[in-house]
Image (cartoon, rainbow, N blue to C red):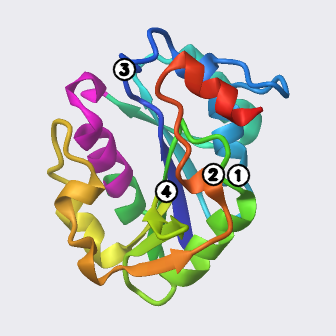
Amino acid sequence: MMAGALLAAGQARRFGADKRQARLPDGRTLLEASAEAFIGRLGPLALVLPEDDAFGLELCGRLGLQPLACRLNRGGIGHSLACAAAWALGLPGCRGLVLGLADMPAVRPHTVSQVAAALAHGQLVLPCYQGRAGHPRGLPADCLPGLLDSRGDAGARDILDWNGALRLELDDPGVLLDIDQPEDLTKLV
């Protein structure tokens, strides 16, 4: 079984507001669109959220996602990563984790399925578009303990050795498109 987790507990400093609630041209929120690519493609699916996040909790309830409150989310993405790794390690039979970012609403559902299928080979998986690595990334269960002490702004790309990763070339430019600033939303039209 492959689990999935989306990191959605960031501060969105460059965006200037809670970008997860930004509306896309189709009316969905940024977070909703990012999560929907994962639904039905994996085993359990979790959303790493700030504590007391009413917006995130409502979305989890509506979409059937497992909310994971990250108490130290203001300390950087490393804390969210550690929270997701601990959750996945606690799932019986979990062979790996497809790790996504909540500000990437253009990732195609088929991409999530392909990353999960490639993860079955037991090595790190890097989805690529035209040779450039993106997200979501596949992490086999045996590398998850190394993420439990993640702190600060160190993400999985900083902690794990991606040199031996399976580079999965996909026809999905969405693996590279993240929304950091309001003007990035125009790239989704």
Q: In this rendering, is residue 83 above or below 134?
A: above
Disc with the residue nearer the chain's start (1 vs 3):
3
The magenta stretch is 71-85
The residue lying toward the viewer, choosing from 89 and 25, is 25
Residue indicated by mark 4: 135
Q: Are the residues at dot 2 and dot 3 in contact (C-beta closer than 8 Å)? A: no
On the image, the x and y values in percent for residue 161 come to: 21, 72
**Label 2 amino acid?**
Gly
The residue lying toward the viewer, choosing from 128 and 6, is 128
35 left or right of 130? right
Specify whether residue 104 is painted magenta: no
Residue indicated by mark 2: 174
Q: Gap in Å between the C-alphas at discs 2 and 3?
A: 22 Å
Local packing at callout 1 (Cα closer than 10 Å; few below 14, some 14-19, many 20+) is many
Disc with the residue nearer the chain's start (4 vs 2):
4
On the image, the x and y values in percent for residue 164 come to: 28, 83
Q: Gap in Å between the C-alphas at discs 1 and 3?
A: 22 Å
Q: Gap in Å between the C-alphas at discs 4 and 2?
A: 8 Å
Q: In this rendering, is residue 95 above or below 100?
A: below
Can I make out residue 92 in this image?
A: no
Q: Dot 3 lies on which element?
A: loop
The residue lying toward the viewer, choosing from 90 and 162, is 162
**Label 3 amino acid?**
Gln
Q: Gap in Å between the C-alphas at discs 1 and 4?
A: 12 Å
Q: Residue furthest right?
A: 26
> Mark 1 against mark 2, which lies toward the viewer?
2
162 left or right of 6? left
Where, quadrant-wise, is the N terminus in this rendering? Answer: bottom right
Q: Dot 4 lies on which element?
A: loop
Residue indicated by mark 3: 11
